Amino acid sequence: MQSVSRVPTYGMQQRSERADFYIRDEQARIAETALHRHEYFQIQVNLGGDTVQHIGSVQRPFPRNALAFILPHRMHMIPHPADSHFVVINFSQTFLLPHLECDPMDLEEVSILLAPELSPFRFQEHLDFILDQDDFQVICTLVQQMRDLDPQRQFGSREIIKGLLLQLIGKVCLRFAEPLKQLAQDNAAQTSRRDALTRMSEYVRKNLADPDLSLTKAAAATYLSPTYLTHWLRKEIGKTFSELVLERRMHAARSYLLGGSRPVGEVARLCGFADEAYFSRRFRQIHGLPPGQFRRQQLDMAVMP
């Protein structure tokens, strides 16, 4: 997987002359071939060419007659075949949900009762939106109407386009109503978040001794963007990534110091500190004593009658 630090964050203004809505086919721009994210919603409609989609940490089929629903800031990629035919619909949160005052990174927590149109986006990692030919033809008609209206908008065109977009999302919600409602009831989005944070925690544990352990590397291993991972850590545990790593390293340092006679320099290295002096300074800031003195004090206390 490409390093998240090199993955661009696209804003609508980078992809379209308008900041609210943009629709195109594969001829307008070459498809992205690496995991990436952007600041707007996206729907992809597969008109021809079976492939897969990578969304978050999972891979799902994306054959002809399928739709993909992608939340803002969600890592994703669809490797379209050379002869594929698809349409991409990009739109802003204010275009779809002007009434919803919500951080884009918290959209997975919005109740389907408050914003049912978010359902396909929230549960794309868990469900394949593949339609039969009759339903897909309805989608294609809506898509073509949006494509006809968007290039030369007039007064009222924006509202018609939004109505067509809502019809498209509504058609999918109606077709997949039962699994969508079940996923919402099972808190599937929250489960995905916990799973992602568990993968991040395991990655940190295995790489704690690496001085180059970073938010970017942990995010890449977790299939999240650094921005998303930072946001979720603050919400779930109230810490930054750096605070979490330092806490884990200090815990490991205490275990090494009290569980053996390793030199302080070796303890520093095992805990991911390339500089012994810096390790000693951080240890003293947290524990009030330098590492060597901390060990002597704790051992002396252990043998006191």
Image (cartoon, rainbow, N blue to C red):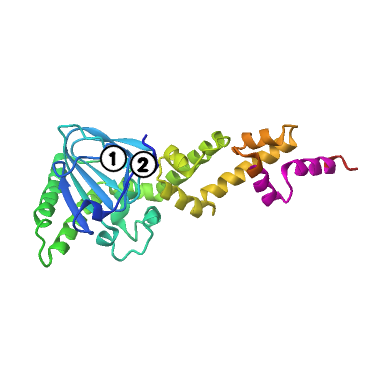
How far from the left and from the top, in percent, is residue 204? 53, 38
Q: Which residues are magenta?
A: 279-301
Quadrant occupied by the C terminus: top right
The label shown at residue 128 is 1
Name the residue nearer the viewer: 61 or 261.
261
Task: Please state the horizontal and vertical placement of residue 150, each as a whole percent of the image.
Answer: 12, 56
- Would you say residue 39 sits in the magenta stretch? no
Q: Quadrant of the N terminus?
A: top left
Inspect this view and state whether residue 186 appears: no
* Residue at the spot 60% in from the left edge and 43% down from the top edge: 248
Amino acid on which disc 1 is placed: Asp
Return the x and y of residue 163 as percentages of the image width and height: 17, 60
* Residue neighbourhood size for the residue with mark 1, other residues' Cα within 10 Å, grouped as few (<14), some (14–19), many (≥20): some
Observer able to see residue 203: yes
Front in this rendered view, residue 66 or 20: 20
Residue pictured at 32% horizontal, 51% vertical = 72
Q: Quick check: 102 left or right of 273? A: left
Q: Residues within 10 Å of mark 2 (few under 14, many from 20)?
A: few
Mark 2 = which residue? 6
Question: Dominant secondary structure of the magenta stretch?
Answer: helix
Secondary element under disc 1, as helix, strand or loop, is loop
Q: Amino acid at mark 2?
A: Arg
| Quarter holding residue 129 | top left
